[in-house]
């Protein structure tokens, strides 16, 4: 392949490494050394993680958790633009500001759908196993170029803004990846088998609707605990979805996976563990930290109930 997924990892690692350097040089950051080390460790995982023993990568993850747990990841003070500068920029650019943002999903979709045709001399342009992610990376690079051209700024300004946003998000930025890997750890540790044993022992799974409800609600509950639907999916699907809904009742696995993930997203709306979705917005808006979750509770519960009936109806047609 011409553009493998590893190039995207290198790109992310370079951005994180530059962020680490900027953090170390930021005198306004009261934790600049520990925060800089945190982002440097994260950069190492992307840059050379594939070359390191798994134990070393695990040790890096633990060290990052220790740094974050003891309050070592704080942001500096960034000087915002004045209202007059924002107004002048808005007048000059107008709705053209949406062009770079919309370019990312558009290029991602085009790359994903056309990847099988982008073959040159028998060599695919995009990594066939990670077409969507590579297309997303390409879309981000092109969007950065468009933004620089439109705003008459340099890529360095983009890195400064990346540093500012990283400071605002803090350690919550790494949660999706960490929690996603937690699902694989739970799966390898046999948590799915334990869930299967508990559910089949104490819940009457001979009733199909009950089995469907256990899977849907279980996806939401495990997501609440883990903070990520991707982490909950292998546990509940390995424990209930595949052995019971597919193996016993011969349901459609594609429908099970789709509605199961949607049920997990209901749990995402209900948990502070999904910090980047629920706590970070509240912090940026300077409102009560649980305000976003409270606003989402009715939507999550209604959708979860609908998912039970939806899966029961669609999966066994």
Image: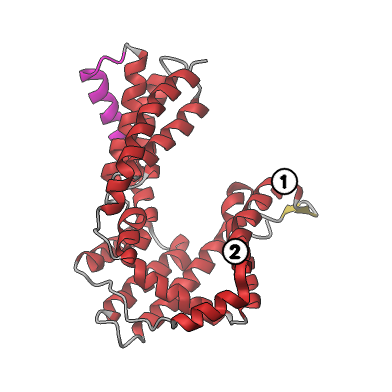
Magenta part of the chain: 191-205
> Which quarter of the picture shows residue 239?
top left
Crowdedness near tag 2: few (<14), some (14–19) or many (≥20) residues, C-alpha within 10 Å:
few
The N terminus is located in which quarter? bottom right
Where residue 263 appears, as percent x and y from the top left, is 39, 35
How many numbered discs, if any?
Answer: 2
Name the element at disc 2: helix
The figure's colour scheme reads: secondary structure
Residue drawn at the location 23% of the way across and 25% of the way down: 198
Is 279 situated left or right of 106 in this image?
A: left
Vertical order, 202 against 9 (above or below) = above
Check residue 202 for magenta coloring: yes
Image position, residue 316 (x, y; %): 48, 16
Question: How far apart, in angstroms, are the residues tagged by discs 1 and 2?
Answer: 29 Å
213 part of magenta stretch: no
Asked whether the viewer can see residue 216, the reply is: yes
Give the labeled residue for mark 2.
98
- Under circle 1, the secondary element is helix
User: Which residue occupies 29% across, 25% down?
Assistant: 196
Q: Residue at x 46, y 73 (%)?
A: 162
- Left or right position of 297 against 156: left
Chief secondary structure of the magenta span?
A: helix
Tell me where residue 137 sits by quadrant.
bottom right
Label 1 sits on residue: 116
Question: How many residues crowd mark 1 within 10 Å: few (<14), some (14–19), many (20+)?
Answer: few
Q: Which mark is residue 70?
A: none
Which is nearer the eye, 100 or 177? 100
Give the mark, 1 or 2, whose residue is nearer the N terminus.
Answer: 2
């Amino acid at each position: 392949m011409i553009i493998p997924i590893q190039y995207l990892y290198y790109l992310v690692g370079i951005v994180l490494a530059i962020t680490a350097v900027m953090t170390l040089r930021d005198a306004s950051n009261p934790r600049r050394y520990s925060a800089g080390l945190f982002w440097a460790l994260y950069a190492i995982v992307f840059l050379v993680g594939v070359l390191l023993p798994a134990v070393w990568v695990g040790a890096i993850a633990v060290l990052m958790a220790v740094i974050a747990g003891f309050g070592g990841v704080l942001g500096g003070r960034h000087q915002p633009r004045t209202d007059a500068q924002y107004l002048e920029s808005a007048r000059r650019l107008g709705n053209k500001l949406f062009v770079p943002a919309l370019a990312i999903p558009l290029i991602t979709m085009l790359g994903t759908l056309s990847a099988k045709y982008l073959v040159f001399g028998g060599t695919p342009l995009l990594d066939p196993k990670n077409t969507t992610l590579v297309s997303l990376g390409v879309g981000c690079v092109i969007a950065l170029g468009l933004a620089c051209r439109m705003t008459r700024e340099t890529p360095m300004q983009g890195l400064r803004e990346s540093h500012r946003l990283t400071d605002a998000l803090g350690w919550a930025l790494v949660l999706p990846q960490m929690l996603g890997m937690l699902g694989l750890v739970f799966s390898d540790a046999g948590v799915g088998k334990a869930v299967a044993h508990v559910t089949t022992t104490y819940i009457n799974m001979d009733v199909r609707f009950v089995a469907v409800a256990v899977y849907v609600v279980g996806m939401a509950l495990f997501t609440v605990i883990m903070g990520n639907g991707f982490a909950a999916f292998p546990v509940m699907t390995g424990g209930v979805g595949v052995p019971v809904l597919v193996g016993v009742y011969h349901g459609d696995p594609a429908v099970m996976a789709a509605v199961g993930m949607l049920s997990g997203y209901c749990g995402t709306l209900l948990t502070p563990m999904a910090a980047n979705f629920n706590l970070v917005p509240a912090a940026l808006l300077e409102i009560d930290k649980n305000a976003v979750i409270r606003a989402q509770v009715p939507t999550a519960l209604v959708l979860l109930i609908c998912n039970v009936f939806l899966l029961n109806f669609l999966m066994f047609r």
